[in-house]
Amino acid sequence: MRRVLPAALVALALLLAGCVSMPSDGPVVDVPVIGGGDTRRASDIDARPPGEGASRSDIVGGFLDAMTAWPVQINVAKKYLTDEAATGWNPERRTIVYTDAQPVRESGGTVQVRLSAADALDEAGAWTGALSGSDLQLDFRLTVEDGEYRIVDPMDALVVPVTWFQQRYRQVSLYYFDPIAQILVPEPVFVPQGDQLATSLVTGLMEGPPPRARGIVRSFVPRGLAVALSVPVDDKGVAEINLVGDAPRLTAEESELMLAQLAWTLRQDPSIRALRVTMGGRDLPIPGGASQFPVTGGEAFDPAGSSAASTLFGISRGQLVAGGAGDLSVASGPFGQTDAGLVTMAVRPDGRQAAGVDDGGRRVRVGPVRAEGTSAEARTVLTGGTYTHLSWDVAGRLWVLDQGRGGARVWLVEGDRARQVAVRGITGRATRSLIVSRDGTRLVAVVRTAGGDEVRSARVLINGRGRVAGIRVPLLVRAAEGTQIDDLAWTTPVRVALLTTTAPGVLYEVEVVAVDGASVGVDSLSPIVSGRLVGLAAEPGEGTAMFAVYPDRYVSMVDQHEYPAGATPLTQLDFVG
């Protein structure tokens, strides 16, 4: 289901490379993927009830068709069920999205539908992955009720084709907090598009974290509350959230955290500028006594790190360089010294501390980015390994990938203490790169396999004291496709850009993938980049910068503007994190 660059386009690019001697440092060529995001409004679909004398196969086919009614409604679909089955059927428990289905088959009293490929969403709309084996076969038992065939045992799921789903659902994020309530953590889910987007967002948040996120995040939205009918948005962009149920009294701090969750969740609806909340008929207090809370509120809990520096940091001739776009200079701290010998580096999200690998990749040190008084030394935190990738989160935890003998190891440095963290499917494997989200709850790695590089994503468990308690089993984000992934970078808190080699040193594809593994409803451009790249530099925010980095310059993937690297060549360029 992944969007794939047309083969003819790649062939044409390779032909040009051979015939006109494409330079190794050529420009970025922005090539949109055919079939990218369609913003047109999906047409309404009326479901058809069962006809008189319909066969068992007709009843099953009609039931599947009725589930594609738009706007979503299931009253007609229930007419294909027995009265008892209709009462108990709950399609909100799960969504199955399939690419194609084989012809309906009858076997005894059962009608079977075999799906060629399908993926599933849980009750919250969170992606749970591909179905396989027997899960791809839907079995329906039928009986005769009032002289007509009716389905006895429908699956508690909405079963719809991928084309229908892509036109009518979009991936959004529900925002929760990390266990110590220091930073918001986005949890991607799919919701129906249209006039009820605000209602879908708030309703999803009311239900608490999706199953996969439980134990990783916490919510300050009280349980036992529900949205009263809908969430209307007035002509000034103010969303009125009326919550009904057993409403507890919240402290001022709890109210602020709840408002931050709602604001960050609702800001994804472009029509909303502010919100007001009532619980059990009482207004939820807003900090400062204001009458409404802006959706731009709660910036202190930004999942990308509100204090994160927007400065670029890189390595040139083994020294740390820093500055704005087009204005890089050697840093004044210990990593800016002429004998720094940096191989790779990463800067803490507050922009104050850096970690650097030197000594040919065998040592990791941490020190200030800039000289601070007389103390400008870096301290050693790891030695003796083969350290290749560093990543910081906003809590100041440093993650280190060690590619030593016997397979990769993942080190975690917290303060002056370093310890290994076991990550199934990554530890002990040929892991090529590793990055951690700024909120500290996600880890993404590229692992080399016999079939090429694959991308795996794992959730990080953080305890109530803010320490890493473990890593959950990773899920497969992108399967090996015989390709090599040279770099990866966060483009949003829940999406990662992959720099994939199409022709080594000549052409690369930049592909954006969702860290939950969703492959449907996540449309994006996949530009082709020409020349010999150093890597990618990107920030994890909507509409923020992403650069293709060359030794002598870096080029914006948004507007194609080129920035000179300066007098010396770059071997790395990144934002903080």
Image (cartoon, rainbow, N blue to C red):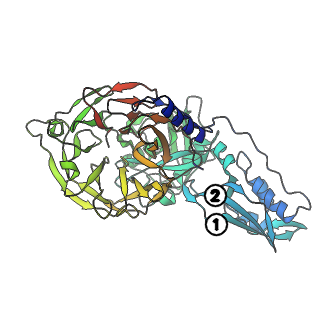
Decide: is 105 above or below 41: below
Report the side of 150 relative to 426 (left or right). right
Residue 241 picture quarter = top right
Tell me the distance, in whole angstroms, between the alpha carbons under discs 2 and 1.
9 Å
Q: Nearer the viewer, residue 217 or 248?
A: 217
Are the two marked residues, 2 and 1, in contact with CB atoms closer than 8 angstroms?
A: yes
Instruction: Specify whether residue 96 is in view.
Output: yes
Locate residue 324 relative to residue 373 in the image: left or right: right
Mark 2 vs mark 1: which is more N-terminal?
2
Q: Position of residue 336 (x, y in %)?
A: 18, 36
Q: Relative to 563, say whether 420 is above or below.
A: below
Q: Position of residue 325 (x, y in %)?
A: 33, 27
Identify whether 319 is placed above or below 255: above
Q: Secondary structure at mark 2?
A: strand
View extreme (bottom): residue: 108
- Is 386 left or right of 297, judged from the image as shown? left
Residue nearest the viewer, comparing 179 with 574 = 574
Percent across and percent down for residue 275 are 51, 37
Nearest to the observer: residue 153 or residue 30: 30
Residue 118 bears which disc, if any? Answer: 2
Residue 208 x %, y %: 50, 55
Q: Dot 2: few (<14), some (14–19), or many (≥20) neighbours within 10 Å? A: many
Residue at x-position 61% and y-position 57%: 119
Q: Amino acid at mark 2?
A: Ala
Q: Is residue 398 visible?
A: no
- Which of the labelled discs sits on residue 219, or is there none? none
In percent of the image, x 87 and y 63: which residue is there?
55
Rate crowding at label 1 as few (under 14), some (14 to 19) or many (20 or more) other CA atoms within 10 Å.
Answer: few
Res. 28 image quadrant: top left
Q: Of the residues shown, which amino acid type is indicated by label 1?
A: Asp
Residue that carries the numbered disc 1 in the rendered image: 135
